[in-house]
Amino acid sequence: RRALQAGVADYLRPRPAGSPQRTHVPASHGPLRNMRLALVKEEQRLAELTWECAMRRASTFSQALATGVTSYLASLSNLELTGYRRIQWIERGYLLCFEGLLSAAGKEQHMIEDAAVAIEMLRMVQIQLVRNEPGGQPGYEPAGDDAVPVYGSRVLRWVSLVQHGRSPAPPGGASPPALTLKVGLDGRYFDARMPPELRGGSVVRLYPILFQMGVDIRQWGANTLNVKSQIDKSRKGRVPESLPSHDLDEDEEGQGATDNDLLMQLNYEAFRRLNIYANAAAPISHPEEQVAVGTVPIHPMLGPLWNFVKGSAGKMEHGIIDKAAAAVGELGGGGVIFCKSGKDRTAMQVTLKQAQFLVAKALPNDRNALLVYATMMRANGTRLPICEKNVGQAKYAFNSLQAKFMPDPLKPPKESIAGFLKGGRIFTGEGAIET
């Protein structure tokens, strides 16, 4: 663009006295015509890329928002949460932990990037629960013209996404939410079940974080190649580019993730935000005695998680996901588990958490049977029918080789894996599944 502008300016510059002045650039001027055509092509490519990014953001954001709202509504039914936690939601936001099981290799790396952007966009959303039917209770609001009806639910009546103008953030504070998602609830449910702290038009802002850790053979291969690359660079006297910065107190807007160690950067940032939330929700009595991340002391409940995060470079460390979920639950937040298809790796993590809940709540004297319970639910629970609905076979899309490289808590039962091809039809070309 600048070269074209300079070329046009040079062509139209004032000429010596007696020479005709140029008032336009003729189409026959070869160099300027070629630069103009090249600029038009680049503008077209920019417009196409901008449109593609906008479409991907719209697609992923809508999914992240639906998942986040579902988690928030489910947390309302958690009888263990006290009014203190709900006041915390209003003041600090609803802590929402996304537990990603994608691998930072191949196409899944792009999925991680898409998910990270969509989850980051949730920070501009706040949720308001309102009473749909009139009844003298505060918070009544009829469905507006832009409300979308919710069919098939006995509780939800409609949802409406209201956009606000973006205003600058106050000094040292966060930007106010740009979107309010209003959820109209059945009047009888609202009167009987809605906590008093969330009535009267109270709004709760989402506070999302993303912890990500690949747990399959692709992540193992990516880690192996990354370690080999670092060794080769160190032998040549060069500093590996994938070594992360330990200064986590930088401006949020300026933080990014390198391609070589995407998971490390995402988990550092997620820990930093979780640590800020933990210190605000459960202040430390003597913060000066704690190790700090930047200017914020590491909360005692996050000590085990911090050890996993800072030592996870080049490792397939499932403990990050496990400890993060435990800390978020202790702080009254919600969790979301996802992988590529939501049926295989997700099933392993969901059944593990079910077994953890069973051991912690129902069978406190049988903690050694955690993996036994998880395996039982993987082989006989609801996860296999989900696989059948997706691929037509009640098997997890793992083979024996892949299972060997998975963390022990996530290994599927041998009788429930599909092998290399569905139904064993190797030579017919039929039934290939995702392995």
Image (tube, rainbow, N blue to C red):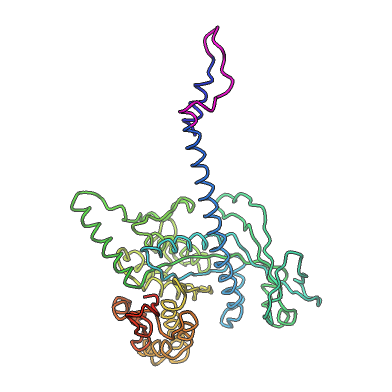
Q: Is 277 or 396 nearer to us in this picture?
A: 396
Q: Quadrant of residue 152?
A: bottom right
Q: Is 105 or 172 nearer to us in this picture?
A: 105
Query: Relative to 376, is 214 above or below?
Result: above
Helix, strand or loop: magenta stretch: loop
Image coords of residue 326 (percent x, y): 45, 76
* Residue located at (71% from left, 83% from top): 192
> Which stretch is magenta?
15-33
Quadrant in which the C terminus is drawn: bottom left
Image coords of residue 370 (percent x, y): 38, 87
Query: Relative to 162, is 389 above or below?
Result: below
Image coords of residue 413 (percent x, y): 35, 87
* Residue located at (38% from left, 77% from top): 432
- The residue most toward the top is 18
Decide whether residue 22 is among the magenta residues. Answer: yes
For residue 240, side relative to residue 251 (left or right): left
Image coords of residue 186 (percent x, y): 72, 79
- Number of marks in the image? 0
